[in-house]
Image (cartoon, helix red, strand yellow):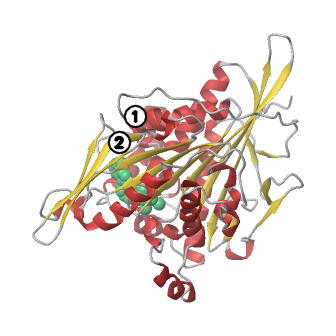
Amino acid sequence: MDTPKSNHQRRSSSPFLMSQTLWSSTEKTCRSGLTRSNDEKGVNVKVVLRCRPPNEDEMQVKGPLVISCDELKQEVTATLNTTTKQINKTFLFDKVCGPSSQQKDFYDQSVSPLVNEALEGYTCTIFAYGQTGTGKTYTMEGEAIKEKVLSDSFFISPPLKCNHHFDRGGKILVAQLVSYLIFHLVGESSIPHLNEEFHKNAGVIPRAVQEIFDILESQKAEYTMKVAYIEIYNEEITDLLSLDEESKPIDEKQRKPLALMEDGKGAVFIRGLEEVTVSTADEIYKILEKGSANKHTAETLLNKQSNRSHSIFSITLHVKECTHEGLELIKCGKLNLVDLAGSENILRSGAKEGRAREAGEINKSLLTLGRVINALVDHSGHVPYRDSKLTRFLRDSLGGKTKTCIIATVSPSIQCLEETLSTLEYANRAKQIKNRPEVNQ
Ligand code: ADP
Ligand code: MG
């Protein structure tokens, strides 16, 4: 078996024969009197609601916060009581994480079980869905990655990094400057506070990567891990890891949209996508940094907004296992980690759709994702997976044989209430997706 031995990233095609894994859904323990999606057999979509703390602007708005989270009952309540409008709606989810939930606890409770399924040979997908500014990227990537990029390149391009980053009053800038000086004067090992901060704020992707490596190393398993990082913007797929030799961020000319293809057996793949073989968590952190830098560069070059693009970080695992009978099995698992475009781009009224299409404002993939969810919930004969790149690529993750977690993110503020209610209703609907024995196209 081709087990990676060096720290160098290698691009390769799979040296393995894929083992066929049959999905059998696991039945979760039912808590008294509540019906949750995962309590039912054949349901593989779990919905987690995360509400972030109010930001500085929201704190200044007079009046109470309109969203409250009950983490024991796994309920979220939206409340508004003004002379003109009264709202009091409660939603039940598989898991609710309130504003005080920390990255580690969130990961351990909501995501870690899926990572373990991927290690067992299943395909698992985690989506972050919500309005821009509610914490999708914070949840998926965390802040540590951004800050590490900043510390590495601070002295190269300070103005760019400052504009990009400093909504928190320059505190990080000072911290990074101090860290940089300490780093160069006394060495990296003597700045434990930086490492602790990195760990505390790390999001789902770095934690998943670390957990996968920890488990595989503890099992002394033979394995290969390959990663790919793509972005879908305006129905064009870009490979975020296609860097030039000097690892500089790609420029516009290098950005070639990739085609989505189907093989003879109907499996969807992206032609020309680079999969990078990695053997340490550090390599993945570097890849994530490069991918994030490319996202930022692309944003500047193409004059686009990151809140209108979807990014997908995929980890493919091949783990060798020996059975008691002495047979060798290769377990082939996959984890897709998806940071969706801001949900405020979804057009909710059919009347508006025509006009938005003319203005080129429509986010086809996000719109289709909503339609796919509706079709799955309503048991429609036709599920429009083929209508967008995102849903085509992740067809098996919705209503298919794979295990999916939708993380819906919201703000607690009155200013976001309308969008928050839409997110809660969307997530609530997604909770009703049942597993389908056959995925219709
Ligand atoms: P999105 O990706 O949904 O547009 P971000 O992840 O960029 O939103 O989050 C917007 C801001 O809110 C960031 O400054 C981020 O640090 C902060 N934030 C988001 N979620 C949380 C959270 N759970 N705890 C603390 N800060 C958060
Ligand atoms: Mg974001």
Answer with left or right where residue 200 lies relative to residue 16.
left
**What's the amino acid at mark 2?**
Cys
Residue toward you, 85 or 241:
85
Q: Quadrant of the N terminus?
A: top right
Answer with left or right where residue 150 lies relative to residue 115.
left
Secondary structure beneath label 2: strand
Residue toward you, 269 or 210:
269
Crowd rating for badge 1 (residues with CA inside 10 Å; few <14, some 14–19, many 20+): few
Do labels 2 and 1 touch, CB within 8 Å? yes
Q: Residue at x 31, y 57 (%)?
A: 411
Which residue was labeled with disc 2?
97
Quick check: can you spot residue 175? no
What mark, if any, has residue 105 been given in the picture? 1
Q: Residue at x 51, y 65 (%)?
A: 341
* Place of residue 302 in the rendered image (x, y in percent of width and height, measured from the top left): 60, 78
What mark, if any, has residue 42 been given in the picture? none
Foreground tag (2 vs 1) = 2
Ligand 1 is within 8 Å of the C-beta of the residue at disc 2 = yes
Query: Looking at the image, is 161 positioned above or below residue 195?
Result: below
Q: Kindly indicate the quadrant of the structure image that contains residue 186.
A: top left
Kindly report the distance in space between the C-alpha atoms of the residues bearing marks 2 and 1. Answer: 9 Å
Answer with left or right where residue 23 lies relative to residue 432.
right
Residue toward you, 226 or 78:
78
Q: Residue at x 47, y 75 (%)?
A: 347
Quick check: can you spot residue 222? yes
Crowd rating for badge 2 (residues with CA inside 10 Å; few <14, some 14–19, many 20+): many
* Place of residue 98 in the rendered image (x, y in percent of width and height, measured from the top left): 31, 44
Q: Quadrant of the C terminus?
A: bottom right
